[in-house]
Amino acid sequence: MTKQSESLDSAGLKDWIDTLKFDDDGLIPAIVQDAGSLQVLMVAYMNRESIEKTVCEGRTCFWSRSRKALWLKGETSGHFQDVRAVYCDCDRDCLLIQVDQTGAACHTGQKSCFFTTLSARPRCVAGGAATGFGLDELYRIVQERKASNPQGSYTAKLLSSGQDRVLKKVAEEAGEVMLASKNGDKDEIIREMADLAFHSLLVLAYHGIPPQAVVDELARRHAAKPAGPPSS
């Protein structure tokens, strides 16, 4: 079940679980990740019994530290997590579970529990160099606006107006890019491409898809491209 394909039958599952490192309460943290987009959905804790149920039944089951009881994800909400793969880390003290998520993973209704960002993000790395602004950071800001819906926010207003309104803006900005390109004004092209990229990012945010998923798809296509003919 791990990346190295530690195949197990039902008899060997308990032996595999015994190789894991549990804390003093008999628990191990489990990171849950969307198998398609690779977005981190939530973190919970598992004990031996919940791991067995998860692997054997194909749906995530955790240990609730507050209720002191097993917790089948989706049992109340219907937002089940169908297990695609189970990994353990190199120290065998943490699990990664890839799932097909039904509905929202977070009890707040968000796709992921990780939608709140630190408002004052560190701007420097070791040596004092400023960190670069990228799509991932912009996506986090968009998700924050989507979740908190602050008054006066263009992003929050557009996302809350519905998918059709967001898609209309993408179409408008695509047209502006075409006109800028025809005009041959590089500064104008950059500005209009920035608008198109931003509104395209809103489409991803609307569906809870991180920009890295698009990069991963491009990488997959690049890796699958057949090699050219040998040069003579």
Image: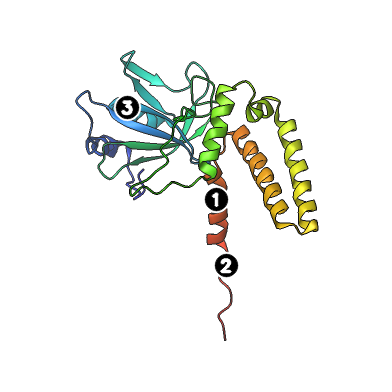
Residue type, mark 1 in image: Val
Give the labeled residue for mark 2.
226
Classify the position of the N terminus by image quarter: top left
Quarter of the image for residue 222 reads: bottom right
Which label number is shown at residue 79? none
Query: Residue 225 versus residue 69: which sits nearer the camera?
Result: 225
Which label number is shown at residue 215? 1
Q: Is residue 36 visible?
A: no
Rendered residue at 71%/34% (across/down): 166
Task: Give the CA distance from mark 2 to mark 3.
Answer: 43 Å
Query: Is 153 left, or right, of 95 in this rendering?
Result: right
Rendered residue at 65%/23% (across/down): 152
Disc 2 residue crowd, few under 14, some 14–19, many 20+, Cα 10 Å: few
Rendered residue at 77%/41% (across/down): 172
Give the labeled residue for mark 3.
46
Classify the position of the C terminus by image quarter: bottom right
